[in-house]
Amino acid sequence: MLRWLVDFSLRFRGVVIALGLVVLGYGIYTASRSQLDVFPEFAPPQVVIQTEAAGLSPEQVEQLVTRPIETAVNGVARLESIRSQSIQGLAIITAVFAEGTNVFQARQMVSERLIEVASRIPQGVGPPTMAPLTSATSDVLQVGLTSDTRSLMEIRTFADWTLRPRLLAVPGVAKIVVFGGEVRQLQIQVRPDRLLEFGTSIDEVLDSARRATGVRGAGFVDTPNQRVVFRTEGQQLLPNQLGDVVLRHKDGRSVRLKDVATIAERPEPMIGAAAIQGVPGAVLVVSSQYGANTLEVTRAVEAALVEMQPAARSSGITIHPKLFRPANFVETAIGNIQSSLLIGAVLVTVVLFFFLADVRTAFISMTAIPLSLLGAIIVLNRFGVSLNTLTLGGLAIAIGEVVDDAIIDVENILRRLRENQLRPDPRPVFQVVFDASLEVRSAVVYATFVVALVFLPVITMSGIQGRLFAPLGIAYILAILASLIVALTITPALCLALLPKRAQVDRTPRYVEFLKRRYRAVLERISGHPKAVLTTVAALCLAALAMLPFFGGAFLPELREGHFIVHMSAVPGTSLEQSLRLGREITKEFEKNPHIRSVAQRAGRAEQADDTWGTHYSEINVDLVPLSGEEAESVQSELRDVLVKFPGVYFAIKPFLTERIEEILTGIRGQVVIKIFGEDLDQIDRVAQDVARVVSTVPGAADVQVESQPGLPEMVVQLKPERLLQFGFQPVSVMDAVQTAYQGTNVAQTFDGNRVFDVTVILDDTARRNPEAAGSLMLQNAEGTRIPLRQVAEVYPATGRYVILHEATRRRQSVSANVAGRDVSSFVAETKQRIGRDVHFPVGVYPVFTGTAEAQAQSQEEILVSSLIAGVAILLLLAMAFHIFFSGGWLTLGSLVGLVTLFGISTRNSIMMISHFEHLVATEGESWGLETALRGATERLLPVLMTALVAALGLLPIAVGSGDPGREIEGPMAIVILAGLVTSTALNLLVLPTLALRYGRFEPTVRASP
């Protein structure tokens, strides 16, 4: 097969070269149109279910809503895990499916189960709905709205009814969540003192409001010639009209709504707020669809924002379009990787010309770079793989390798052509090129497949680590395989077309000849002492192994995207006003830093949002001006110093993408997460507090937090059944009255153009700010008896939980922590030891360690197992190649992948050295001994040095800028490979020939003539 392919390429070299140009052109076209993103889609297939349960407490939501849905979904095929959050009025269930599950099929299966469970959910609870399907990184843009002249209600109205619909129409946008502002309502604010004065109740107000605002269809009649539709009008939706609605007659006069309530446009009770640069406003979080192109969606949304600017200005509203723009990181990261590729290619060209001292030979070798990389991009694009920092990183790491095959081929062909010129009877040039190509082809093919096998552990990793690194490994392997095809076809064709005349004169530079002489002399001295060489190598290996315990470990390096998320958690129950006040003070401190471009705060939660934050919780987005990775890290340290000034408040700060990866790994934000399972909430709360106390004492612990802190202030309304019976009240009617008073009940909707607003009955602001007065709320039974709430219920203050967490249908608490100043692996080991020693776990309560450290341990185990399998396969390939068996910093996941890559590169050069020894003995008839070993090693010196140098220089730009955006993962890989290339080159040039001379066995064999 190889003989036929090389022969075809030489005979039809014009066709082959033309096909190469076609691949080059199509590859450039494909690369220019490929989807660009920062990471591949790394989230597992998952479905998020949201259910609104207005007014229900977390415990009621858990038992009445969450558990039935969990039970229904739990039996769905390929379900891997299920977790939930139950807060007041809302249940969020996240179902995570096994790798490879079609996410659309998963949504269909979940939808069928939700239809079944809908009938088992209490009346008054909204239907379970699936959240829109979004990408792993989700957010593509955060947009702020502020105004010096407009109210928060007007800002929110503009956001909901003007800006949001326009942005939702942008292709690729999945959903838009609006934080902050004030949602406009027409409120009937009931005054408790006036209810007492006029002897009426909130039930009467609610009933009268419903009657006044009701709407009914009137049907139609058919006449002999036409159909006439009846339309009724008479809804009383204006404040003055509602105010005149009669409640009842008393002492000969009518009691109207305006006598007991204030009717006006007011904001609905707020569950969240937002501020931009400390100024209250609204923030729109734009999320992209699953599989959408981040850059395309971002630019389309920004174009829509430009269109909306005139409308915003005319309304007196300022749009802040780039509070958070992940596309900045995408553009910077892709740009950095592309510049690394370009610089690496230039450096490789310089090295080739330096050693080959010939433009044509350097050109032929260089053609392998664009053809191999573009060929890989064509295949990646064909299978829908985006160009991201990982796939481009795989191509960047391969840049020095893809030229190896061509270097080996060109160098061997050129050397054989020069030798042929010195023969008394020169052979035909065609035959010389053909034989020279085949001479190294077999070894190159085996070496290429060895490199591909070496990456088996990378592409077979499971979980998020597999989804992140598999595209890198696939891109690398595709580039290497493409380079093999180029070396088998285009390289021989170009050599036959361009090199024969250049071979007439030996143009080997003097410095290369000098290098060969010095190398031969050194190798000759070393080869006489094989035992000393073995001892030295063994000592170095033992020294390296002894260093391993001193290396730290981390799952991924910190991503430096130029945008930080600051999580701020105050005492549970803290009001939105207090959270915003804290946010303003923090913003003032942050604004003193010249490297900060914008600060935006989101407090509480928003409707349709995936997060279940309370009013005590805020997320502060800090966007930086363009900085290097080192400068961004310095700013992060400065921000931590600022946050120390606010005692009593929990803070955590990290880059957005790092946080998203951690959240997808465990469902919780934090490098180290200890999940505590049990059934008694009070019990697991106590254990969680003990665990948090112990974790805080471990050196390096930072941002230690109990996820669901108890202590939320509550006002309990405990109904008394005997009193309800005595006064003739139904329990649900009392609950409805309390819900109307403090949450509000919508009785109708009013229209303003195409905008729709609720008409709501609720207590006035003064009464709702005094929870102790809840017992005075007036109730009315079916017979018209009016009594205060305290007559049928006990009303008392208490403390509760804001959220109840489940995982695998079991209740859980969790303690999260970040690590500062040491590696994560050693921190986790020490933490486990201390918790096991100092924390007592009651029967039925147990901890589970998760987070990036556990993911790293799993990855290392998978890499080890896969490496053993790959090692066996590599040994078989080596045996086939040689026809003989011979006898005798911090380690991130990226670093481990670098070690795997280095092993492949080193093995490749070793194969080429040994195969050349075998060729000299088996084909050229040399006897195996010192002279043959020296000749073979000297002849392989130039290819080995060139391949090592081009690999090193191709990686140098990535290693030098390893902390910059886009190079955080590939940087450690490049550093490991660069360092290893030094030792592996020394081993291949000095140790391997010495050991082959002492322990190798090469025998002449009869070969078929080519």
Image: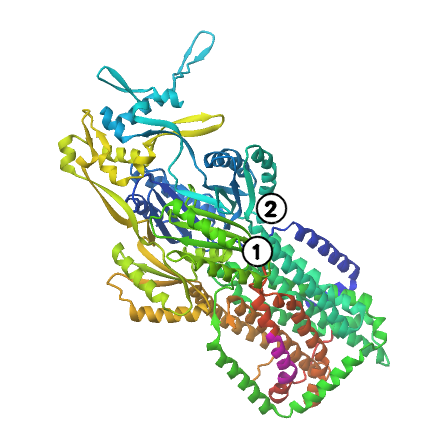
Determine which residue is flagged by label 2. Answer: 296
Q: Mark 2 is on which residue type?
A: Glu
Which residue of the protein is positioned furthest toward the bottom in this rendering?
528
The x, y position of residue 273, in whole percent, is 43, 43
* Left or right side of 531 for 402: right
**Around disc 2, counting alpha carbons within 10 Å, would you say few (fewer than 14), some (14 to 19), or many (20 or more)?**
some
**Around disc 1, counting alpha carbons within 10 Å, would you say few (fewer than 14), some (14 to 19), or many (20 or more)?**
few
Q: Is residue 297 above or below residue 945?
A: above
Tell me if residue 236 can be seen. Answer: no
Q: Is residue 833 above or below residue 27?
A: below
At mark 1, the secondary structure is loop
The x, y position of residue 318, in whole percent, is 55, 39
Tell me if residue 28 can be seen. Answer: yes
Q: Tag count in the figure? A: 2
At mark 2, the secondary structure is helix
Q: Mark 1 is on which residue type?
A: Pro
Give the main secondary structure, helix, strand or loop, of the magenta stretch. helix
* Left or right side of 437 for 98: left
Write down the region rendered in magenta: 979-992
Q: Is residue 811 magenta?
A: no
For residue 684, which quarter of the picture? bottom left
* Left or right side of 359 for 345: left
Determine which residue is flagged by label 1. Answer: 594
Nearer-the-camera pick, 142 or 904? 142
Tell me what residue is drawn at x 63 percent, y 59 percent.
336
For residue 624, which quarter of the picture? bottom right
Nearer-the-camera pick, 286 or 375? 286
Mark 2 and mark 1: Cα distance apart in space? 30 Å
